[in-house]
Image (tube, helix red, strand yellow):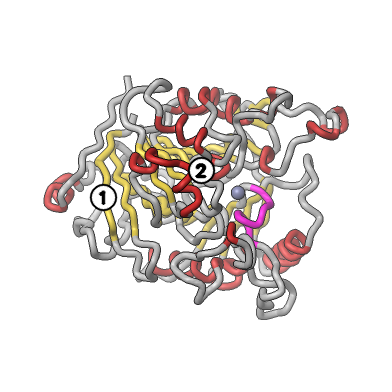
Amino acid sequence: MRLTIAIALCTASLASAQTAPSTVAAPTAPAPEVGKPLPAWSRGMLDIHQISTGRGNSALFILPDGTTMLVDAGAAGDGTKMADAEQRPDASRTSGAWIVHYIERAMAPTHAHLDYAVLTHFHADHMGQVTPTSLPSKTGAFKLTGITEVGERIAIDTIIDRGTSYLPPPDDETMKNYRAFLAEQAAAGRKTESLKPGRADQIVLRHAAKEFASFEVRNVAANGIVWTGVGNDTRSIFPPLDSIATDDRPSENMCSLGLRIRYGRFDYFTGGDMPGVPDAGAPDWQSVETAVARAIGPTDVHVVNHHGSIDPASAIFLATLQSPVMILPAWSATHPSQDSLKRMLTKRLYPGVHDVFVTTLREPAKASIGSRVEQLKAQHGHIVVRVEPGGGKFRVFVLDDTTSEAKVVSVHGPYTSH
Ligand SMILES: [Zn+2]
């Protein structure tokens, strides 16, 4: 049976609770305090930052040995539509530049560097978007937006995306731009790879894997090829593309890749915009969440798929994962939908804690959600999951996303990993 604890901690008790297991030599970290910057990551911790930009998804991971990874670098729209207005912290920089700023602050005083950057799929709110105002790179070979802007400013050793061997990606300026960026990365000796579903040896600790043997990044899904939960085995849940009626063809969202990160008893899942509730009359295989849930089982923290929009967060997905903590990366007025949020919060699917943290809840979304909004643990902010050395416990910090300093707004936990 899963045991979870969610207690609002005063800062004094946080300090005493932050003790590393004897096998890990972690320095004593200062206690996080509301109103102050979050103390820096230290060796043995797993930090996961869901960065609030108001323009899409981006999450920074600092793994227990200091290996670093970015999942997505969204920068949707040019700010002219209501759905993509209100950047965070503000419109003085592009979203890509704010992501760079966030990474540099989180990694200070170390020089910012990314061992991995992963794109869940090829949409603007996950990779960026070329607009008339996009600036050129130093060489002029591509425009700066989202992932290409991050890569221009911070060295990325390995870029991993879903690949293009199944569903062709969008044929647009942004994809052409991304390809030009990849070509420059490859010419500079950096790696560009497609995710290999089922494997746990593609994204690895780069510095001290043996010291943190309970840590693993498992590739759960991409393009409808889903890990079975046994060994490295996978199965394909989508029929061959040429056998599917045009209306039923998988969408870019359905092809999103998904990762499970495990550290001791702690499990986390992120899966881009994969759906769980097919459109009325659509085939059942379009519920990618169902196959993913079967593979990964109970989870401590998951990123809500497709921004909590109308088609993710199926009952079977939620009831199988039983996550006490859900991170909802929202940016549009339609995130989350009333129905999805209702499913996330109901105790009919699983008992215990259901803490939902939203990165950017728009006023129209708030109005449509109604009184359920009061059950959210955060309506805006950078959401940081900090897992203690060994993975036994974790806390969630909400950081202020309205200024560049990102001071701590609230502290949640400790939660006990399942
Ligand atoms: Zn999206």
Specify the amino acid type for callout 1.
Val
Q: Quadrant of residue 184?
A: bottom right
Magenta stretch contains residue 112: no
Residue 213, visible in the rendered structure: no
Specify the amino acid type for callout 2.
Pro
Where does the image place residue 232, in percent across and percent down from the top left? Answer: 59, 29
Q: Which residues are magenta?
A: 121-128
Question: Which mark lies nearer to you, 1 or 2?
Answer: 2
Q: CA distance from mark 1 to mark 2?
A: 23 Å
Q: Quadrant of the C terminus?
A: top left
Q: Tag 2 or tag 1, which sits nearer the N-term?
A: 2
Where does the image place residue 72, in percent across and percent down from the top left? Answer: 57, 54
92, 105: nearer the viewer? 92
Side of 22 where 292 appears, left or right: right
* Disc 1, SS: strand
Badge 1, how many Cα within 10 Å: few under 14, some, many 20+?
Answer: many
As drawn, the label of residue 336 is: 2
Where does the image place residue 53, in percent across and percent down from the top left? Answer: 49, 61
Side of 164 where 259 appears, left or right: left
Where does the image place residue 191, in percent across and percent down from the top left? Answer: 65, 58
**Residue drawn where x is 50% and y is 37% of the image:** 338
396, 265: nearer the viewer? 396
**Residue drawn where x is 54% and y is 45% of the image:** 307
Side of 250 where 272 appears, left or right: left
Residue 407, visible in the rendered structure: yes
* Disc 2, SS: loop
Q: Quadrant of the N terminus?
A: top left
Q: How many numbered discs, if any? A: 2
Circle 1 residue: 411
Pick out the residue farthest to the right: 242
